[in-house]
Amino acid sequence: MDAGWYPCTDWIRVGTWEPDPERFPNGLKAISDYVHERKMKLIVWFEPERSEPTHWLTVNHPEWLYQARKGDVVVNLGNPEALNWIINHFDGLITTQGIDVYRQDSNKNPLDSWRAEDSTDRQGIAEIKHVCGYLALWDELQRRHPGLMIDSCAGGGRRNDLETLRRALPLLRSDYQTTTDEPEYMPGNQAQTYGLSSWIPFYGAGVYYSSVRLVENVRSSLSPSFGLVADVRKDDIDWDLWRKLMGQWRQVAGCMLGDYYPLTPHSISLENWIAWQFNRPEQGDGMIQAFRRDDNPSETMQAKLQGLEPEAVYSITNLDDDSVMDIAGRELTNDGLNIVIKDKPGSALIYYRKKS
């Protein structure tokens, strides 16, 4: 359950952290019970660092807020009283509402608030206290709820720092998602996979259903954690294709936790290919993704794979047509795998497994 489960006229009106009594007169527990009966977990969105002028935190505890400029209401997590209230209140919601995954967003830029809080000879102190409070909130929630998963979301993936990643997973790597059919969105999402995979082993993304270029849209955002979004009330959804794409993701998702190798230079140009490989030496398998973009003239690229055993033979499966061929590891490493994509834009998703 994303933003908007609390009393609000629209999702950004935060600061009263209770289930909306009109829509949820019995709270969220009925929902979490329904979810748990089906052996799933409930994730709920919070944004403790922000409030609105007419909502509970601002009205009842203005002393807990920074007031850097008119209309900018940021909760001071460096204030011990504010921090303790948030910890205790959110702990109570997790317990009473049956929340399994705590998702924390941040859509305010607090820098001006921090600077205004400190005198010129103490610049940085408010920031240090705030960040310590932010981390202490998570540490205490996880202490009180062993095994609690935290989803780190900050207006998109803008808080993927080391201390955050020690405690949380970015289940939505960015708000820059494939929400339109415009060609520039796909290279942007491909670039995220290309870059993040060198640093973050587990992250997530989602794709909205589109009747145009759906395969490339989905593959541009494939991640270890992945979701497809569709309005099930509509009649124009190709459910067979939707299920096929989700099945392909399930087949290769585990590989994305393996060793990562870029196979081309980084680029967002529509004139280029981009490709990468994930390899699991312990399991003897891996996957390759390649994208031919809108203005690229070549139907083929040669991808020299990495991390393979030279003397082993690998079974290579093209997940588009289920064609299979056996190639020696030495050949795949030295000469490369010939990847053919006839359409532009187009994509290839290839799975391989060691045979011997």
Image (tube, rainbow, N blue to C red):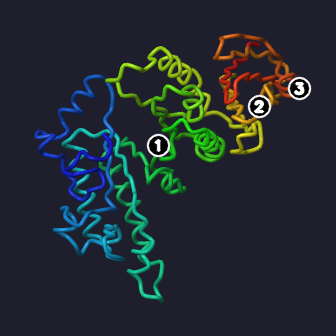
User: Which residue: 52% across, 38% down?
Assistant: 178
SS for tag 3?
A: loop
**On screen, residue 293 above or below 245:** below
Vertical relation: 42 (above or below) 48: above
Residue found 25% across the figure and 24% down from its top: 37
As helix, strand or loop, the secondary structure at mark 1 comes to loop
Callout 2–callout 1 Cβ contact below 8 Å:
no
Q: Amino acid at mark 3?
A: Asp
> Which mark sits nearer the N-terminus, 2 or 1?
1
Give the residue number, with chain letter if any, for mark 3.
335
* Residue 172's disc number: 1
Expressed as whole percent of the image width and height from the top left, the position of residue 34 reads 23, 27
Q: Nearer the viewer, residue 333 or 84?
A: 333
Cα distance in 3D space between marks 2 and 1? 29 Å
Q: Amino acid at mark 1?
A: Leu
Mark 2 or 3: the one toward you: 3
Which quarter of the picture shows residue 284? top right
Disc 1 packing (10 Å; few <14; some 14–19; many ≥20): many
Name the residue carrying label 2: 307
x then y, percent, for residue 112: 43, 74
Q: Does 110 sit left or right of 291 as displayed?
A: left
Q: Amino acid at mark 2?
A: Gly
